[in-house]
Image: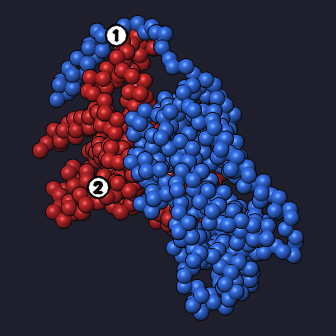
Chain colours: A red, B blue
């Protein structure tokens, strides 16, 4: 199949899942009502609240479609895309397929920030902010260490990332130890498992900006990421200085990871496995890999979140489901082998 | 492909624009509303007649199951068959919607809205940031959310608040609030009468191996100090308000508690023959007990309404000269009031572990 056709199919699938997700949930709402509600929201948005559809729905229906489902589905798409692209970017940069977005400590840092905020009794928005700040700080630490080290940059950076990660995860364990077992400990544990169950519009606004700031440059510079996949010496022999590009990629990927984790908690697996799925289908070229990872990550997380919010009366954390659903599929793909031309 | 997408987007837009019309605020016919100020100072409009209540977690579940189980729309988690023996049977049929943890939650909001609840009640210890979290939640799900502080000092007040909110429950609330007040006052009076030389030290083990303890200062172990005893286990820094410090047997021998209480389903039954435990003074003297665990652990877990029973139980065990009554009939009375359950003397004895 041609790349364009595949991409179009993937895009159409993503759009389909996005729209179909609005019709799924524990609270049964008929199709026309959902459509009218969404249309009403849209019309109100473009007319600045002056125009709207005549109200044929109940307050409960409006709460569910507009305040519960809309932010959740949008967040799933955004977080899924962000984690997958960040994962793909990191993997290329470190020339290592086992790398995931938490390699430099972004998610463990974010997790620690959230745990600390819960321990200190911060409110929800405080937890989100702390988590984002610590996620960024962790990677900054790793980067500063690697910069002042005498070892080769990439290795130094990975080592520093692993160490910073373990520092922060030890910090998280300590916070869990001293937390109140009645309310704080379950809150921290639940947060770390990752979930979109309490996503509000405000969270979406909070995370959308850093995610887009990270996503757009990576998308525009995607062909250049290919340059990072060859060794530094080789790149230099071709007359390319990769230092600044490397820094930019790290910054973008970190920004996206920290912002995602700060609203969704730790959702593992997506950032590691989705880029591999895409490689199996589209090959190694980052020009294709970046847009495909974004679409596939978004689709996958929306699908899994649909399961999370419809399967039972109490939510199953997303971090658990992504692995339960994704890992078997991935194992199957490894066994049967893909169409990729690995270099 | 692109064309199809563009055309369909265009069609959707046309449909939306055609059916759009200026927004006019219609006067909505609303049920009578009353203002209510909750424990974190938020003033919320509630229906005057509340008969459908959603709970946010285990503490609110326990309170509602006691005061008005017929008004409940959900539970945090479905009680076990053993618990349901004593609890209102409706709890076994309600949807289990998970728990609200600060801002994040395992609650399925759609399920919550689908229950048609008129109010969401969150109960427990006061936490910073709770007002902001509930405001956000209320805006999102469109159901008024309130918080009632419900630790021991605020428990009777919490019942009285529930009495004013819930339709026709004022008397029932007063009955329960009185029970709480009576318990706390009895304990307070006895606490002052107990002479220093009579004070006993108690170790409260929480894990099944007996080495997790609720140390002095933890909220799980409140009952010990309330009845007028000393917590035998003092740690430098209580690992948490919630307890669960792991101690070594060596520390237990060093602390040498007068009395040890074990959690339900722990090593209680085997300690007498366990070489590591049997040399402890409390074990040798036979001063060790198993905490009654149904429908909820009487000492804690959760530290809530069930602790009221724990006060009468532990007080009676430690200081029968002050807490002088027949625990079997007290248990029967309390189960009647708390859970509307007719506890037979045999059941009470089996709960209390007396022959």
Q: Residue at label 1?
A: B20
User: Dot 2: what SS?
Assistant: helix
Marks 1 and 2 on same chain: no
What residue is at 33 percent from the left and 61 percent from the top?
Answer: A97
| Protein chain holding label 2 | A
Q: Which residue is mark 2?
A: A325
Is residue A117 or residue B321 the one in the foreground?
B321
Residue under the image location 26 percent in, 27 percent down:
A31
Image quarter where the N terminus of chain B lies is top left
Q: Can I make out residue A200 in this image? A: yes
Query: In the picture, residue B298 is in which quadrant?
Result: bottom right
* Rendering coords of residue B166 (x, y %): 57, 34
**Other residues around mark 2 within 10 Å, as few (<14) / some (14–19) / many (≥20):** few
Instruction: Name the mark on residue B304.
Output: none
CA separation in Å, label 1 and label 2:
42 Å
At horizontal 18% and vertical 38% (from top left) the residue drawn is: A9
Image vertical order of residue A63 relative to residue B223, above or below: above
Residue B290 x, y percent position in the rendering: 59, 74
Residue lying furthest left:
A1
Chain bearing tag 1 is B
The foreground one among A222 and B285 is B285
Which quadrant of the view contains residue A298? Answer: top left
Secondary structure of residue under mark 1: loop
Q: Look at 51% across and 19% down and name the residue there.
A: B31
**Is residue A148 visible in this depiction of the protein?**
no
In the image, A143: left or right of B161? Answer: left
Report x, y in % for residue A103.
45, 59
Looking at the rendered image, the quarter that the C terminus of chain B falls into is bottom right
């Amino acid at each position: 199949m041609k790349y364009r056709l595949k991409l179009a199919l993937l895009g159409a699938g993503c759009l389909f899942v996005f729209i179909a997700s609005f019709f799924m949930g524990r609270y049964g709402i008929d199709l026309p009502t959902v459509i009218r509600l969404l249309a009403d929201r849209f019309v109100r948005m473009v007319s600045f609240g002056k125009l709207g559809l005549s109200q044929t729905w109940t307050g409960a229906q409006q709460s569910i479609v507009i305040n519960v489902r809309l932010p959740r589905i949008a967040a799933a798409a955004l977080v899924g895309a962000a984690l997958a692209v960040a994962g793909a970017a990191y993997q290329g940069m470190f020339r290592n397929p086992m790398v995931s977005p938490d390699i430099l400590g972004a998610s463990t840092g974010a997790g620690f920030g959230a745990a600390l905020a819960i321990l200190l009794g911060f409110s929800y928005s405080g937890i989100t902010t702390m988590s984002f700040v610590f996620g960024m700080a962790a990677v900054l630490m790793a980067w500063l260490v690697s910069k002042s080290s005498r070892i080769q940059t990439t290795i130094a950076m990975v080592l520093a990332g692993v160490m910073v990660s373990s520092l922060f995860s030890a910090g998280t364990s300590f916070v869990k130890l001293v937390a109140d077992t009645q309310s704080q400990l379950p809150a921290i544990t639940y947060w770390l498992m990752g979930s979109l169950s309490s996503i509000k519009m405000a969270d979406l606004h909070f995370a959308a900006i850093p995610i887009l700031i990270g996503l757009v440059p990576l998308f525009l510079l995607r062909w250049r990421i290919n340059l990072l996949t060859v060794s530094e010496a080789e790149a230099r022999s071709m007359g390319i200085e990769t230092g600044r590009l490397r820094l930019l990629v790290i910054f973008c990927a970190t920004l996206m990871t920290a912002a995602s984790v700060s609203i969704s908690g730790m959702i593992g697996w997506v950032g590691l496995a989705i880029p591999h799925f895409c490689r199996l289908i589209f090959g190694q070229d980052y020009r294709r890999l970046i847009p495909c990872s974004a679409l596939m990550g978004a689709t996958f997380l929306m699908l899994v979140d649909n399961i999370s919010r419809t399967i039972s009366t109490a939510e199953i954390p997303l971090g658990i489901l992504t692995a339960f659903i994704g890992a078997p599929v991935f194992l199957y793909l490894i066994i049967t082998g893909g169409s990729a031309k690995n270099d | 492909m692109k064309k199809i997408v563009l055309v369909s987007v265009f069609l959707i837009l046309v449909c939306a624009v055609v059916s759009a019309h200026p927004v006019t605020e219609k006067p909505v016919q609303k049920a009578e509303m009353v203002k209510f100020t909750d424990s974190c100072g938020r003033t919320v409009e509630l229906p005057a007649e509340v008969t459908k209540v959603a709970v946010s977690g285990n503490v609110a579940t326990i309170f509602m199951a006691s005061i008005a189980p017929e008004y409940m729309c959900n539970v945090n988690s479905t009680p076990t068959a053993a618990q349901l023996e004593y609890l209102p049977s409706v709890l076994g049929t309600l949807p289990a919607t998970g728990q609200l943890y600060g801002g994040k939650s395992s609650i399925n909001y759609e399920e919550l809205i689908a229950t048609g609840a008129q109010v969401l009640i969150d109960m427990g210890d006061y936490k910073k940031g709770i007002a902001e979290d509930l405001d956000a939640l209320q805006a999102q799900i469109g159901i008024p959310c309130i918080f009632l502080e419900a630790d021991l000092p605020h428990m009777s007040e919490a019942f009285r608040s529930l009495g004013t909110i819930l339709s026709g429950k004022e008397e029932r609330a007063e009955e329960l609030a009185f029970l709480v007040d009576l318990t706390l006052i009895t304990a307070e009076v006895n606490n002052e009468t107990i002479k220093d030389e009579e004070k006993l030290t108690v170790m409260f083990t929480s894990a099944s191996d007996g080495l997790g303890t609720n140390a002095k200062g933890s909220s799980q172990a409140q009952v010990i100090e309330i009845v007028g005893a000393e917590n035998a286990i003092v740690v430098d820094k209580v690992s948490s308000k919630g307890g669960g410090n792991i101690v070594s047997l060596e520390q237990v021998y060093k602390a040498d508690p007068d009395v040890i209480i074990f959690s339900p389903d722990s090593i209680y039954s085997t300690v007498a023959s366990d070489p590591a435990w049997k040399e402890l003074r409390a074990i040798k003297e036979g001063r060790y007990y198993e905490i009654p665990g149904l429908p909820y652990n009487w000492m804690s877990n959760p530290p809530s309404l069930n602790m009221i029973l724990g006060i009468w139980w532990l007080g009676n065990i430690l200081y029968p000269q002050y807490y002088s009554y027949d625990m079997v009939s007290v248990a029967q009375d309390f189960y009647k009031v708390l859970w509307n359950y007719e506890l037979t003397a045999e059941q009470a004895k089996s709960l209390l572990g007396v022959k």
